[in-house]
Each structure stands twice: as structure tokens, then as C-alpha cells.
Image: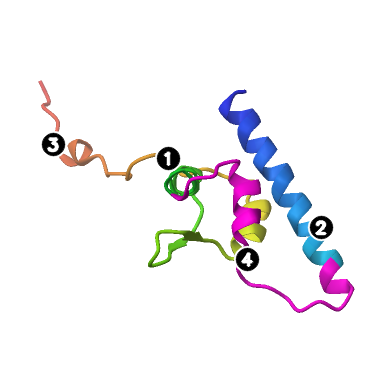
Amino acid sequence: MTEFDAVLAALARIEALLERAVTAREAGSHERTIVTDDELREITGLQRWSAQIRWLRDQGWAYAVRADGRPVVSTKEIERQLVTGGAQRTKGTAEPDFAALRPRDRA
């Protein structure tokens, strides 16, 4: 499975979770704000918390880490990811090109 296929599969899982949440809300259930551990495993396809955190970071998701090491994701973040199409952040931090500011030799 390519990375693109993995992202598409994750988005499909997220859409299914949102559909269930909307159905539950329409049925009168109270609105949750935090994704359950089972839902997070379903979204990431991973069991270990450290692997889930790595996946969330690599995919550009906003998350917090509980004192026991578990990642926490809000349902609003799932919605945001769907709106942005699961856009990924580039790995590492972006740095400005300081060399472009240096004067060029005019020979």
C-alpha cells in the first residue's frame, strides 16, 4: 500500500466515524469532543500510542498527549482534516532561504 493509499484509507475511516457521530447526534445523543481510543486506532490503523503519535505528527494533525502517554484528538480536528482534504505538513520545519538575501557578485 502506498502512502497515498494509506491516507485515502484513513480519510475513509474518518468519514465513517463522522457519519456515525452525525447519526448519533440526530438520534439525540450528547456530542462528544474527544475521539475514543478505539476510534483513534481505527483512524490511524495503529495500536501503540507512540506509533499513533508519530502518524498524527506526520499527517499534520493537532493532538495532545495525556500524562499516561496516550494521544488525544478532538472531533473538531477530524472535521478540519476532512475539510482540508487531509493535507499533510512537510516533515521538519520550514526555514527561510537566507542565502537569497546575500548580495550577489556582479562580475
Which residue has dot 1 on it? 90
Relative to 39, say whether 103 is above or below.
above
Which residue has dot 3 on it? 103
Separation (CA) of disc 4 from disc 2? 14 Å
Looking at the image, residue 19 sits to the left or right of residue 68; the answer is right
Separation (CA) of disc 2 from disc 3? 56 Å
Residue 94 in percent (x, y) is at: 33, 44
Asked if the stretch drawn in magenta spans residue 36, the answer is yes
Q: Earlier in the sequence, mark 1 or mark 2?
A: 2
Q: Earlier in the sequence, mark 3 or mark 1?
A: 1
Q: Front-most of 96 and 39?
A: 39
- Magenta stretch bounds: 24-49
Q: Earlier in the sequence, mark 1 or mark 4?
A: 4
Task: Tell which tag, 4 or 2, sits nearer the viewer.
Answer: 2
The answer to whether the residues at label 1 and label 2 have Cβ atoms under 8 Å apart is no
Relative to 11, say whether 38 is above or below.
below
Quadrant, the C terminus: top left
Looking at the image, residue 14 sits to the left or right of residue 34; the answer is right
